[in-house]
Image (cartoon, grey):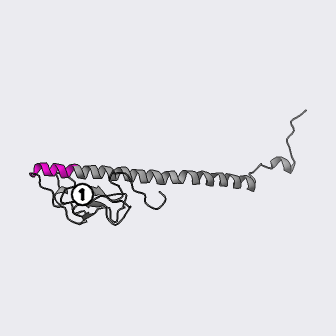
Amino acid sequence: MTNAPCRSASCNVRRAFTLVEILIVVVILGILAAIVTPQFGRAGREASETQTFRQLQQIRYHIQLYRSRHLGAFPTVTEGDGTWGELVSDEHFQSAPVNLLVGPGNGRRIVVRENAEPDTVFTTEYGWIYDPVTGMVWAAGLDAGNQPLPTGQGG
């Protein structure tokens, strides 16, 4: 048996993928993408929840720190966009805290309510609730136990 070189046209044909094989790969990739994409969204939401909770803890800490340094007086917090009064200074915050659950648009906005309570439904109208009577602060999007409120968007 000799290994003579093939001179016919069929010897030079390369095996290529068929259209069906390519479509199967595309469908499998689509299914994998559909499975993975919601995981990224959930991870982003959890990161926002964690960051907002940390910001809330920092605000509460700095209010208590301010009170201990100013004979029990509360800082001058007014309603508006990042208006934390004396808390935005070299001693406390370099810039106003942002509630990432609410988003950048209203995440810095503070509402001031006497005898305030935390939200019971999710809102994006403001980022923080401040009670000037008690000095208590709550984050919009978190309940009384500092747990995330449902957004109403399936997440």
Q: Is residue 105 left or right of residue 41?
A: left
Q: Quadrant of the N terminus?
A: top right
Residue 8 in the image, given as x and y percentages of width and height? 87, 48
Range of residues picked out in magenta: 61-71
Outermost residue, top side: 1
Secondary structure type for disc 1: loop
At x 60%, y 51%, the residue is: 32
Residue 63 in the image, given as x and y percentages of width and height? 19, 52
Is residue 42 covered in magenta?
A: no
Residue 41 in the image, given as x and y percentages of width and height? 48, 54
Q: Considering depth in this image, is 55 or 17 the residue closer to the camera?
A: 55
Outermost residue, front side: 115
Assign the magenta stretch its main secondary structure: helix
Is residue 70 covered in magenta?
A: yes
At x 20%, y 50%, the residue is: 62
Q: Looking at numbered disc 1 in the image, what kind of residue is underneath it?
A: Ser
Q: Quadrant of residue 4?
A: top right
Residue 25 in the image, given as x and y percentages of width and height? 67, 51
Question: Dot 1 surroundings within 10 Å: few (below 14), some, or many (20 or more)?
Answer: few
Q: Is residue 24 left or right of residue 70?
A: right
For disc 1, the marked residue is 95
